[in-house]
């Protein structure tokens, strides 16, 4: 019987062990999509205790705590941080089979050198040990990032954000990790959502453009894309919970925009036309700037309206959607490709039933200009599990080029989540090792080691080409 989470955790054959320890383990990280706070990175936040570092904002943990019968008082409520930690420790043994069980212990091991198993009995001692370390030098936010060998952190930012802390970090030029913005214009596409008109007003202010019509609106969005680009941004991200495409024209969408800005609601069909035209417009702009465009598809958000009214979004009440994505996704990509304006694109779906659909679609739009230009994004959110990751990788390998896969991202609000890259790399190496052990591929460690290192880091490095872009003179902290 293998020891619990030893050095060969998840590695079930000799080839996997060699690939992980000799090739993948020590590769750097490009975290090309996350929800970390640039303010906390700039200020090099010091956490007062493990609860603040571990449980604040982590809706992965909140969901299973609720499922374990923990009252909201001990999750997002007013209970003390110590009592919240104890509630999490009580839940951890019940998460066996969930990746949270392994992630929890990886984080304790890698960041704090604690190999004890977390449960109600061990919790008080672990609380003391971790908090003692958090009060030492070397356990601040920047330390967690650097010690994880992270080279690039790409945050998720609204077009109206000032990027104040990204710019301060670049001006400071003391942190050896590039912290760059990711352009997330969801509020600018959700035309029927409450607050859209106010958001347009804020966009006009930061872009310094009087938005009187749809043409002005597009100009303002374009201005902010260039602002992000000058701040080092090289990626966009779109939460397309329902993939849409409706044939339309600039003139028709201009009328839709004007109607909505007058305070009138618009139909679902009109909303789809607005999203389609605006998304294609942005896609062309991304192509011109050599950005990567990310589509996160098929999430069903804010299921529990009572708790949404109490806690708001991103608090653990989302799930998998089952909208059909093939036709609208192909039409969006094809509309850009017809004008030779399809940017590098990464497609994720929260529904694992879409795996083979996406794996088959992406190779219809590869153009030979860059390896893996259109990517099947790594297993995301509810699929960020052992089986979910393996299913995604097997679908990709069976229909495309697994060797060109750009690999893992954290998609996290926690600075302790970088161990997820280790978890992912172990699965990559074990999958390749299984192919070798089964006689499906040759035991060529030069080739297989390069593939493992590519998926771990090198492919993303080449794909995104993140650079220390100079801040041009017109940038200011608006």
Image (tube, rainbow, N blue to C red):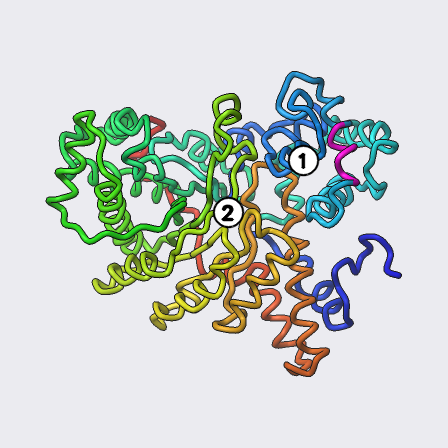
**Placement of the C terminus among the 4 image quadrants:** top left
Q: Which residues are magenta?
A: 87-93
The answer to which image quadrant residue 473 occupies is top left
Q: Which residue is mark 1?
A: 67
Mark 2 lies on a secondary structure that is strand
First-in-chain label (1 vs 2): 1
> Is the residue 443 above or below the residue 314 in the image?
below
Q: Which residue is mark 2?
A: 320
The residue that appears at 63% across and 19% down in the rendered structure is 77
Contact between marks 1 and 2 (CB within 8 A): the answer is no
Q: Residue furthest left?
A: 251
Q: Point out residue 69 in the picture as x, y percentages from the top left corner.
A: 71, 30
- In the drawing, does residue 304 fall left or right of residue 185? right
Mark 1 is surrounded, within 10 Å at the Cα level, by few (under 14), some (14 to 19) or many (20 or more) other residues, namely few
Mark 1 lies on a secondary structure that is helix
- In the drawing, does residue 145 fall left or right of residue 33? right
The residue that appears at 69% across and 23% down in the rendered structure is 74
> Is the residue 393 above or below the residue 140 in the image?
below
The residue that appears at 84% across and 27% down in the rendered structure is 124
User: Does residue 90 show up magenta in the picture?
Assistant: yes
User: Does residue 417 show up magenta in the picture?
Assistant: no
């Amino acid at each position: 019987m293998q020891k619990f989470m030893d050095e060969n955790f998840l590695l079930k054959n000799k080839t996997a062990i060699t690939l992980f320890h000799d090739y993948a383990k020590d590769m750097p990280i490009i975290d090309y999509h996350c929800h970390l706070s640039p303010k906390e990175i700039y200020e090099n936040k010091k956490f007062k205790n493990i609860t603040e570092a571990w449980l604040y904002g982590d809706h992965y943990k909140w969901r299973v705590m609720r499922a374990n019968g923990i009252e909201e008082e001990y999750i997002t409520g007013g209970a003390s941080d110590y009592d919240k930690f104890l509630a999490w420790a009580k839940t951890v043994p019940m998460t066996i089979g969930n990746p949270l069980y392994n992630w929890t212990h990886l984080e304790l091991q890698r960041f704090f050198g604690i190999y004890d198993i977390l449960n109600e009995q061990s919790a008080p001692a672990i609380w003391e040990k971790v908090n003692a370390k958090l009060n030492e030098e070397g356990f601040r936010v920047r330390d967690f990032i650097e010690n994880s060998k992270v080279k690039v952190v790409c945050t998720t930012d609204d077009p109206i954000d000032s990027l104040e802390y990204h710019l301060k970090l670049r001006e400071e030029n003391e942190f050896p990790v590039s912290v760059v913005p990711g352009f997330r214009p969801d509020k600018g596409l959700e035309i029927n959502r409450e607050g859209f008109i106010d958001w347009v007003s804020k966009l006009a202010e930061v872009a310094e453009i009087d938005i009187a019509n749809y043409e002005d609106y597009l100009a303002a969005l374009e201005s902010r894309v260039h602002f992000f680009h000058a701040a080092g941004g090289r990626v966009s991200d779109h939460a397309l919970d329902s993939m849409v495409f409706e044939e339309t024209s600039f003139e028709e969408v201009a009328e839709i925009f004007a109607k909505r800005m007058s305070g009138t609601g618009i139909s679902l069909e009109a909303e789809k036309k607005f999203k389609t035209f605006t998304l294609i417009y942005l896609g062309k702009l991304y192509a011109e700037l050599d950005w990567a465009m990310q589509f996160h598809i098929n999430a069903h958000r804010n299921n529990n309206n009572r708790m949404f009214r109490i806690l708001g979004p991103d608090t653990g009440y989302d799930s998998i959607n089952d909208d059909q994505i093939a036709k609208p996704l192909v039409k969006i990509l094809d509309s850009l490709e017809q004008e030779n304006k399809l940017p590098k694109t990464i497609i994720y779906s929260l529904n694992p039933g879409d795996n083979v659909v996406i794996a088959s679609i992406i190779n219809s739009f590869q153009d030979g200009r860059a390896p893996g230009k259109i990517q099947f994004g790594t297993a995301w959110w509810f699929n960020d599990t052992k089986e979910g990751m393996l299913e995604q990788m097997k679908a990709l390998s069976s229909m495309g080029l697994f060797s060109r896969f750009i690999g893992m991202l954290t998609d996290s609000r926690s600075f302790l989540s970088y161990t997820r890259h280790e978890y992912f790399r172990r699965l990559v190496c074990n999958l390749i090792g299984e192919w070798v052990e089964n006689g499906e591929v040759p035991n060529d460690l030069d080739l297989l080691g390069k593939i493992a290192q590519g998926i771990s880091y090198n492919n993303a490095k080449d794909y995104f080409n993140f650079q220390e872009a100079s801040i041009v003179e017109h940038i200011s902290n608006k």
